[in-house]
Amino acid sequence: MDRIAKIKNLLDEKKALDIMDYDLRDSDYFVDYVVVATTMADKHGYALLDHLKKNLKPHEEFLGVDESNDWILIDLGDILIHLMSEEYRAKYQMDEFLREIKKA
């Protein structure tokens, strides 16, 4: 299983919503891939983060994690994972932003 599929599968196992991935290798963006998922509540975001850490750490290096109740950002070097509340995902229009980068 490739890395993106594994991340998406792990998020799906813990009931993350609207899981999307963006291949940005052909863009000028600073990472190759971005995965975005919606959390059901702040505790759900932290549970998703813990699940990812437990299952990815042997194979992935977590370079950084920025946590808040509405948005958790995980930096794996060439992959960014955004775990966002529904409100923040709509407010910051992350998916639209990433689609525009991919087009450019």
Image: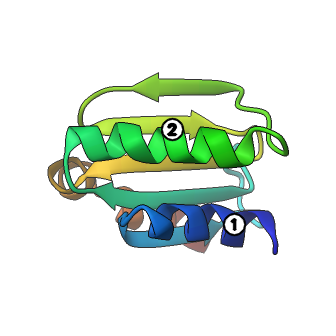
Which of the 4 image quadrants contains residue 15? bottom left
Q: Residues within 10 Å of mark 2 (few under 14, many from 20)?
A: few
Image quadrant where one finds the N terminus:
bottom right
Q: Residue at x 71, y 39 (%)?
A: 76
SS class, disc 1: helix
User: Of 69 and 98, which appears nearest the observer?
Assistant: 69
SS class, disc 2: helix
Q: Residues within 10 Å of mark 1 (few under 14, many from 20)?
A: some
Q: CA distance from mark 1 to mark 2?
A: 15 Å
Q: Position of residue 104 (x, y in %)?
A: 60, 67
Q: How many numbered marks are there? A: 2
> Which-is-in-front pick, marks 1 and 2?
2
Residue at numbered disc 1: 6
Q: Residue at x 71, y 52 (%)?
A: 28
Residue at numbered disc 2: 50
Q: Is residue 24 above or below residue 64?
A: below
Residue 104 is at least partly visible in this image? no
Q: Residue at x 48, y 71 (%)?
A: 20
Q: Earlier in the sequence, mark 1 or mark 2?
A: 1
Residue 2 is at least partly visible in this image? yes
Q: Position of residue 68 (x, y in %)?
A: 31, 26
Which of the 4 image quadrants contains residue 102? bottom right
Q: Which amino acid does the dot numbered 1 rest on?
A: Lys
Residue 27 left/right relative to 71 = right
Q: Is residue 50 above or below residue 28?
A: above
Q: Which amino acid does the dot numbered 2 rest on?
A: Asp
Kindly check if marks 1 and 2 are in contact, taking CB atoms under 8 A apart as contact.
Answer: no
Residue 88 left/right relative to 83 = left
